[in-house]
Amino acid sequence: MGVSYAEIKHEFDVTLGYIHDDIQALCAGTETVNYTVALLIGVACEALEDAGFYANKKTVLADLLPDDDWKQLAGVLYEALRNGLAHNFDTKHIDVNGQVVQIYLAWSMPRAITIEQRNGEEALSLGTCVLGKGICDKINAFRAKLQNDPVACERFKNSLNSSGRRVDCKPALWNVLRNKP
């Protein structure tokens, strides 16, 4: 039977839609908010996996990279970006046989990724807006799939109801808070 897009449109709009719109708005602005966009890219990778559009979040990130050589770095890059920014408030560094490589987020860089010299050291630079546009394209592709695929809509709806999306609150506390002005 499946679920129609109309049935899940609101949930799509308040999850991946918000991520998409925020990235679009941020990249269109004049302020450089590299960490915000990079973290949203990581969150979008995770959301596209959870919703069933990709088998795993690293594959989503790999699809944003220019070729097969760069795609091999997707797992390391995902860990460094998503988990580094979310938990350490900085990207994690990449360890290459004892050489520590810093990741730089470059707002106006015209390509997705490159290795370059920074401060006399090898560094990995990421084109924040290029990657942001790429993830927005993936979200748009998923939206288009949902609009025409009831089975994908059902999978998306089921992902929204998973227990991993909920946190427990004691009813007594909630009742106290509910009655506060």
Image (cartoon, rainbow, N blue to C red):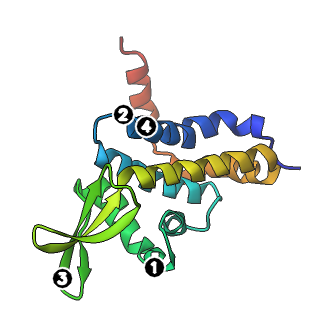
Amino acid type of disc 3?
Answer: Gln
Of the image marks 3 and 4, the number of the one nearer the N terminus: 3
CA separation in Å, label 3 and label 2: 36 Å
Q: Which mark is residue 63?
A: none
Q: Which mark is residue 72?
A: 1
Q: Which mark is residue 29?
A: 2
Residue depicted at x 80% and y 53%:
151
Say if 9 sits above or below 156 in the image.
Answer: above
Q: Is residue 145 left or right of residue 128?
A: right
Rendered location of residue 167, percent (x, y): 46, 45
Q: Is residue 137 left or right of residue 71?
A: right
Rendered location of residue 79, percent (x, y): 36, 67
Q: Nearer the viewer, mark 4 or mark 1?
A: 1
Q: Which residue is mark 4?
A: 170
Q: Which residue is mark 3?
A: 99
Say if mark 1 contacts mark 3, CB within 8 Å.
no
Looking at the rendered structure, the secondary structure element under dot 4 is loop
The crowd level at tag 1 (other Cα within 10 Å; few <14, some 14-19, many 20+) is: some
